[in-house]
Image (cartoon, grey):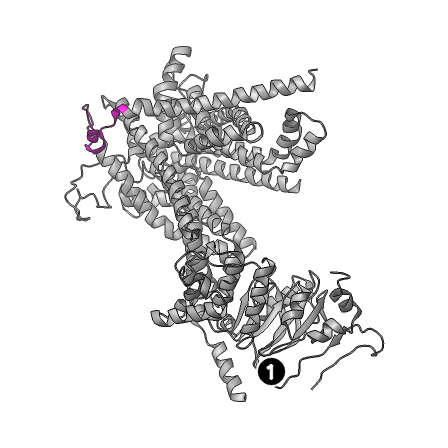
Amino acid sequence: MFLSNDVQGNTEMLERHIVQPADAEHPTILSTEDLHVYYGKKEAISEGDLRFASNQITALIGPSGSGKSTFLRSLNRMNDRIATVTGRIMYRGVDINQPSIDVYEMRRRVGMVFQRPNPFAKSIYDNIAFALRLRGTTDKHELDEIVETSLKQAALWNQVKDDLNKSALALSGGQAQRLCIARAIAVKPDILLLDEPASALDPVSTSQLEDTLLELKQNYSIIIVTHNMQQAGRISEYTAFFNQGRVLEYDTTSHIFTNPQVQITSDYVSGNFG
Amino acid sequence: MMKSTQQLEQQLKRHSKAAKLEIWGKVVSFSALILIVAVVVGIIGFVASKGLATFFTNHVSLWDFLSGKSWNPGVTDANGKPEVGALPMIMGSFLITVLSAIVATPFAIGTAVFMNEISPNKGAKILQPVTELLVGIPSVVYGFIGLSVVVPATRAIFGGSGFGILSGTCVLFVMILPTVTSMSVDALRAVPRYYREASLALGATQWQTIYKVVLRAATPGLMTAVVFGMARAFGEALAVQMVIGNAALMPGSLVDPSSTLTSVLTTGIGNTVMGSLQNNALWSLALVLLLMSLVFNLIVRLIGRKGRLQ
Amino acid sequence: MMNPKTQNKVAIGTLYGVAGLVVLILLALLGYILVSGLPQLSWHFLTAPAKAFLKGGGVGVQLYNSFYLLILAMLISFPIALGAAIYLYEYAKDNWVTTTIRTAIEILSSLPSVVVGLFGFLFFVVKLRLGFSILSGAFALTFFNLPLLTRSIEDSLRTIDTTQREGGLALGLSRWEAVTRVILPAAVPSILTGVILSAGRVFGEAAALIYTAGQSAPALDFTDWNPFNISSPLNPMRPAETLAVHIWKINSEGIMPDAKAISSGSSAVLVLAILLFNFAARYLGKRLYKRLTSA
């Protein structure tokens, strides 16, 4: 099934070009319908209806202030106190943008990793075990196991396995960000949202992080905001281009980068602005 | 498919442990906050009800209270009215506050300028720790030193008992100096670096820069520091009570024994019977004290607002 | 008209003079307290009970009372201040209610301590019939302490990066958990510093106590730890003159023959205690912070 709502004819550049993913192997896990985000009276997101495929990586790109981070943070309602979000956010058929939803339970299924690494001022072990303990996992063996697998999945285990009791604040930027990923996946979410996770990292750490994300895709559906076009090109299956609070183009990543249908997208991916 | 969706929805709508904790935490922390507010309301309410009793229960006129020069609540004057003139104490409190602020301000601001603009190194090494430590010295210690050093010195120079407004001013000057200094330092520190750089780059001398740029930009903060110092001086009880002489008379000179609102309160409240006019009159003094602290608060706010507008 | 360069020299010279004079005054003050007070200090002075009409008394009971009141006041005020600070940090919306509450707290912090003491007298001593007692004093000190402690804890919480809070929320923690389990532990070093500094203030406070904890120090039997016995050090219902109140009392009454020596010694003890609190605050704060962040 192809959903295309081209606004103009095919010969010229379009104003909007949305092709929702339609891959039977990777059914839609999350979608937004009629989503609007307001900061006070100012509308930050006006057209942002997207479907996200499961076990794939979707990249959200666009110039600063285009609304991509706002959009991402709305998906697990991190914007609840800051902005007004209207419309539906369908997660496996359930609208999670309604007041009766328990946001805490929901966020355990839709996890998030932030722009700047934010390990807690606790030991490496406790950074991961802490949220689990609060939700009743107290068995030492079980915790040990989860800590180990999470750190392995985040490709950090080998570097820290002897220092699990040391403070997480002593980790390097790249290691700290991996720890944050390990922490996020330890609660076994379904979807992982990443808000420019590599923007504070050096090139080596960035490429390690990308490898990790490609690994994680087998078990998680990933949505990542990135400033870095090459990064979107390297790791994502789908890419959405945001501009001024609207999704202007959404398609497979290869289409977006090789054959953009919208002028602004084309300008952006070729580095002419943004 | 439908069934699993329903199941998920149920799970997501279940009131989780986190949600329960959230409500609990909100209630507990709000109660703590409300308790503090209740204390404030309680203090103002109690002191006001007691302090107003002089006027409503004992029918003393407010004007007599504020302008009367004779304080002797147990005695009635020739017209049969009780002698509850609080003017001597009000005068004493204001005199001592204003005088100590006048003396302390140039020293405090001068020192703050030195610490922040001229020799930040020496400032950080010597002055900062010393002022910080002295801010914390208990007021009774200031009072005791006033009693054993300042009062004899005043006596030696001016004769008389040595107790009085001058001694009180000296004690309060030293007492508020650290507070006003450290707050002035904060005010100067808040002036952006580039103000100074721009001025120096234009060829202004360091003093011109300090005087015309830094001090001017920091004026609201410096004023706040001085008002804070005044509020502290006005409300200080024991240190003043120890050196002022405690004579509820209009201050004839700076070296005659006098009294302030706080000194009369500390000496008097234990020697009167609850509910009597003598006692109520003291509570009226407490009310004046409380109102004045509100006024100081208001002034600080006004300065803050004006500073923001600029 | 002086030329700007000369003017500059004169002005800066003057500022040097002013700063030097202030240092001199402050050091003379400290020096006087220590020089006149330290010779008075002895084990006897610090432990013996006071004598009202004779020479050679000590301040043992007063010193003990000061610490006991301090601990009680901190035990009561810390949880309240913590709760209030958490609410202000996490839940308070930016509206008129919050502004009013903040104003109320500011008013409390600017009230003269004698007013707080008088209220304590009226409410606890007289209305609730607690009499001149440790308990009345502890409540008065709590009121005196609450606003500054609340503000200091809130400021400490605000020094922690908000990304920490978001990190907690993203794991499905409630806001309460994010604050108490993530932000609060990270802020402990700075909170501790604030608590110790406020303890110094409470330790030296006298005006709030003279009509609440009272001005007499009945002898204590340091072998009797049953809080219901009148001579027990733990009894919270007994009057308890503290060291700071003692200094004021013996100087205003003037019947003790060695009042001056005792006051000097007591002042030195108070100042040394404040010094100790200051150093402890800095040292412990730094130490804890290091432990929290080091590998």
- Seen in the image, is A102 located left or right of residue C248? right
Question: Residue C250, position in %: x, y?
Answer: 27, 27
- What is the crowding at mark 1: few (fewer than 14 residues within 10 Å), some, or many (at least 20)? some
Residue of label 1: A26
Which residue is pictured at 74% across the width and 66% down the height?
A269
Amino acid at circle 1: His
Where residue A207 appears, as percent x and y from the top left, is 59, 64
Asked if B263 appears above or below C145 in the picture, the reply is above
Q: In this rendered view, identify the residue nearer to me: B57 or B297.
A: B297
Is residue B191 depicted above or below A116 in this figure?
above
Chain letter of the residue beneath label 1 in the structure image: A
Boundaries of the magenta span: C39-57
Identify whether B232 is placed above or below C120.
Answer: above
Number of residue marks: 1
- Which of C203 and A272 lies nearest the eye of the viewer? A272
Considering depth in this image, is C253 or C151 the residue closer to the camera? C151
